[in-house]
Amino acid sequence: MRMVELIEKKRDGGELTTEEIRFIVEGYTDGRIPDYQVSAWAMAVFFRDMTDRERADLTMAMVESGETIDLSDIEGVKVDKHSTGGVGDTTTLVLAPLVAAAGVPVAKMSGRGLGHTGGTIDKLEAIPGFHVELTREEFARRVNESSIAVIGQSGNLTPADKKLYALRDVTATIESIPLIASSIMSKKIAAGADAIVLDVKTGAGAFMKDEQDARRLAAAMVAIGNQVGRKTMAVISDMSQPLGLAIGNALEVREAIDTLRGEGPDDLRELCLALGSQMVYLGGAAGSIEEAEALLKELLASGKALDKFKEFIANQGGDPAVVDDPDLLPAAPYRIELPARESGFVSGMTADAIGTAAMILGAGRATKESEIDLSVGIVLRKKIGDAVQAGESLATIHAATEQVGDVLERLNAAIEIAPSAQAPELVRGIVTE
């Protein structure tokens, strides 16, 4: 097989065989095929697309390029959740104990995030004493006993995807649907999931700005998962504004506790019920999505989901008292209000600009070496569609210093006020086939 012939084949609209796709992935991973040839092939894929079978083959070739995680010692159907990213995305902190309370095992492997705020592990480590340094045996035992545990990602998962992702980033092929879909799904499959639920964001603060593109990506990933034997479903959700009210690590933990207590933001609760219902259904704990949603609502109302969060925290060395007294979480020394410039209705929020403001405060990492301040962040007081009076607070800035002029300017520019406005629809669609 010659790489130049495979480039020509895809350039001319041909369909690559399973063996040809494996040849490309293996050759690029071990260095036999150079960057410039894979760049040409990626551009051909960008313009010519791939069939469902090609996408599934590409995904599995990337899975097989490195280690895979065997979760067979954990009982039940292991359902993983993936979000395509956003601002104030607190869903995992709520979903993990909520779904575990329904008896579906949550064996979560998470990383530390770059960008606006930290990853799930950073947020959990805002809880005093909480740690993710579990052996694989401890991890499995915790999940089998309590249905929930979280550890850091380890091992050399999908090295082909790491190389290809870096190449796409510098060759203008990052937006290719088959390449995005296979990248995301290869990591989930390599991490041992039996079933996968996807939260595909759309809107100004999302990677997929256009809703039709988000639907195409969701359909592509669901097709890949089901084709390779992983039951997969997706939710298309709005990210034209931050999800919930809190953006920042300890602040998001507090918001998750509020939500599990039944007092959190309506949009965060709505999305968690939509995603959680799919997870519980795919995990076999309910016979339908509707039955799963009713079960989750009962677990929230009864306090069992909140109790599961306490148990989870205690099992990983954290102080469960934070659930009853969130003031035990790290707190920033300064709170500064952002007053509205005029009266009206909040008509727009540039989500990624608000996220950048939180990162400037220290809530996120600009580079892998950046230190996170777990206490800082932003709590929104208004969302799109809410009425506001001039001088009323639009947001509270939780800061390590009083010198937050740049953050105030960014937030002022990011929040629009108009004579009228309507709240956006949160859940835009469900993809099951």
Image (cartoon, grey):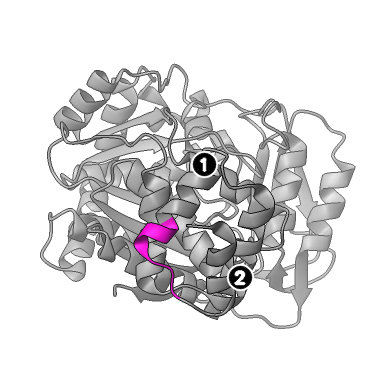
Side of 302 relative to 325 (left or right): left
Tag of residue 29: 1
Tell which of 132 and 23 is nearer to you: 23
Residue tagged by mark 2? Answer: 44
Ranked by sequence position, the earlier of labels 1 and 2 is: 1
In percent of width and height, residue 244 lies at: 53, 55
> Which quarter of the figure has residue 7?
bottom right
Residue name at image x 70 percent, y 46 percent: 396
Q: Is residue 19 magenta?
A: yes
Residue name at image x 84 percent, y 33 percent: 402
In the rendered view, tell whether residue 341 sits above or below residue 255.
below
Q: Are marks 1 and 2 in contact (CB under 8 Å)?
A: no
Q: Is residue 229 magenta?
A: no
As helix, strand or loop, the secondary structure at mark 2 comes to helix
Residue 146 visible to an observer of this rendering: yes
Q: Which residues are magenta?
A: 15-21
Tell which of 162 and 86 is nearer to you: 162
Q: Answer few, some or many: residues within 10 Å of disc 2's Cα (few below 14, many 20 plus, some between 14 and 19).
A: many
Q: CA distance from mark 1 to mark 2?
A: 19 Å
Q: Answer few, some or many: residues within 10 Å of disc 1's Cα (few below 14, many 20 plus, some between 14 and 19).
A: many
Amino acid found under the numbered disc labelled 1: Thr
Amino acid found under the numbered disc labelled 2: Ala
As helix, strand or loop, the secondary structure at mark 1 comes to helix
Tag of residue 50: none
> Which quarter of the figure has residue 349?
bottom right
In percent of width and height, residue 319 lies at: 39, 20
Residue name at image x 35 percent, y 73 percent: 431
The quarter of the image holding the C terminus is: bottom left
In percent of width and height, residue 209 lies at: 63, 71
Residue with the most extreme front position: 1
In percent of width and height, residue 24 lies at: 49, 53
Residue 269 visible to an observer of this rendering: no
